[in-house]
Image: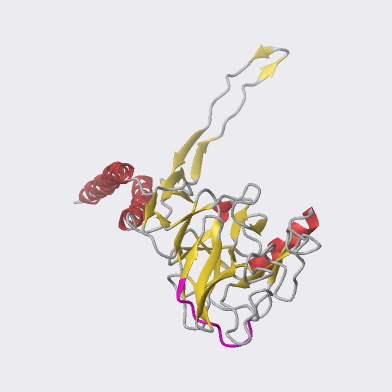
């Protein structure tokens, strides 16, 4: 078979793969939080006809000239499929929604972990342990803050996944977040004496024996909210009715996850990304919105898709032409083979 036909087939496959990426981008032009992907090609293996060689010389006198190598290529392959994490325009939708005003991700999980995940950024060793624990917890990370309260009092996203964050040390006017439900250390601004914080699935406290001056209990049936809202600082406030009187309580503060290399995340569908042990995301930490370099939130907003339709249509046209050109190579190769067959007649 002709090398040209092999190259044409390889070109058809790689251009079809790029069309798949482009079509997925266009299909998600109106998907909240969607991050577009870009596709690149690379050339494939080569067959060497002549190797590169230097000329021969004797006593400083050239006896023969050097020659350059000659190689035959076999078409193109998929080079890379990269995700563009550039932030897109936030759209105001109101309600119990929030958009991250910068880089980072909300932390969710399809299950309610039996034990909290401790995050600590006080040292390099602590960050390594935090990274290991968070990746082993199988969290799903999302840019879409579509929140609501389920029948059990948990804060969940649009997929029904539990939203993780830091619990307050008191239900009203808390001075610390993330110290755990039994701690009331108001002198520690980090939420724990060691600088560590505990990530829990955020939930309304127990409706029994509610004491708004102390940390809530979370083992029994949760109190139901009359209304709930989230602030730009990530604090979730709820209105409850206690003994015929409306009271405002704090459910907690959502956590924002930051990755050393967010391009190493894998898409998990449903507007989520996944990280696992051994991947290329590097270290991962979780902090409060607006603390240090962590961005604040935009309450009531959702991030739009960052798909650029003008670019996608332009890429679609050039990719279609590339596909047509490679199909033409196969047609010409077939005609040449037909001529060879006809020579026998």
The magenta stretch is 218-227
Residue nearest the viewer, comparing 141 with 240: 240
Q: Position of residue 130 (x, y in %)?
A: 71, 62
Q: Position of residue 291 (x, y in %)?
A: 64, 51
| Residue 180, quarter of picture | bottom right
- Reply above or below: 26 against 247: above
- Reply above or below: 287 against 150: above
| Figure disc tally | 0
Colouring method of the image: secondary structure
| Residue 64, quarter of picture | top right
Q: Is residue 20 magenta?
A: no
| 121 relative to 47 in the view: left or right | right
Residue nearest the viewer, comparing 141 with 118: 118
Magenta highlight: main SS: loop
Which residue reaches farthest front?
244
Residue nearest the viewer, comparing 33 with 318: 33
Q: Is residue 225 magenta?
A: yes
Residue nearest the viewer, comparing 48 with 168: 168
Q: Position of residue 174 (x, y in %)?
A: 66, 65
Q: Going 51% across and 59% down the picture, which residue do you hit? A: 231
Q: Position of residue 234 (x, y in %)?
A: 55, 59
| 210 relative to 310 in the view: left or right | right
Q: Going 32% across and 43% down the picture, which residue do you hit? A: 315
Q: Going 62% across and 59% down the picture, which residue do you hit? A: 279
- Reply above or below: 265 against 163: above
Q: Is residue 305 visible?
A: no
């Amino acid at each position: 078979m002709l090398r040209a036909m092999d190259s044409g087939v390889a070109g058809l496959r790689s251009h079809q793969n790029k069309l798949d990426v482009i079509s997925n981008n266009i299909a998600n032009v109106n998907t909240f939080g969607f991050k577009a992907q870009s596709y690149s090609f690379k050339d494939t293996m080569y067959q060497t006809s002549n190797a590169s060689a230097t000329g021969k010389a004797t006593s400083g006198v050239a006896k023969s000239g050097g020659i350059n190598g000659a190689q035959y290529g076999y078409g193109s392959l998929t080079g890379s499929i990269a995700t563009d994490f550039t932030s897109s325009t936030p759209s105001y939708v109101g309600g119990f929604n929030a958009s991250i005003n910068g880089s980072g991700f909300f932390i969710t999980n399809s299950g309610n972990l039996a034990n909290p995940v401790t995050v600590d950024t006080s040292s390099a060793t602590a960050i390594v342990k935090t990274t290991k624990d968070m990746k082993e917890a199988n969290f799903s990370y999302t840019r879409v803050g579509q929140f609501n309260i389920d029948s059990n009092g948990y804060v969940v996203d649009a997929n029904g996944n539990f939203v993780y964050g830091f619990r307050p040390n008191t239900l009203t006017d808390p001075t610390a977040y993330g110290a755990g439900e039994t701690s009331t250390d108001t002198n520690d601004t980090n939420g724990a004496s060691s600088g560590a914080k505990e990530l829990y699935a955020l939930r309304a406290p127990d409706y029994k024996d509610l004491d708004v001056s102390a940390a809530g209990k979370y083992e029994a049936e949760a109190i139901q909210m009359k209304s709930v809202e989230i602030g730009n600082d990530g604090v979730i406030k709820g209105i409850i009715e206690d003994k015929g009187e409306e009271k405002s309580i704090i459910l907690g503060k959502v956590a924002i996850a930051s990755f050393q290399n967010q391009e190493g995340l894998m898409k998990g569908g449903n507007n989520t990304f996944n990280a696992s042990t051994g991947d290329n995301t590097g270290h991962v930490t979780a902090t409060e919105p607006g603390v240090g370099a962590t961005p604040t939130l935009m309450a009531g907003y959702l991030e739009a898709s960052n798909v650029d339709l003008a670019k996608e249509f332009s890429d679609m046209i050039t990719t279609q032409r590339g596909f047509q050109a490679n199909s033409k190579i196969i047609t010409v190769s077939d005609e040449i083979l037909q001529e060879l067959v006809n020579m026998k007649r």
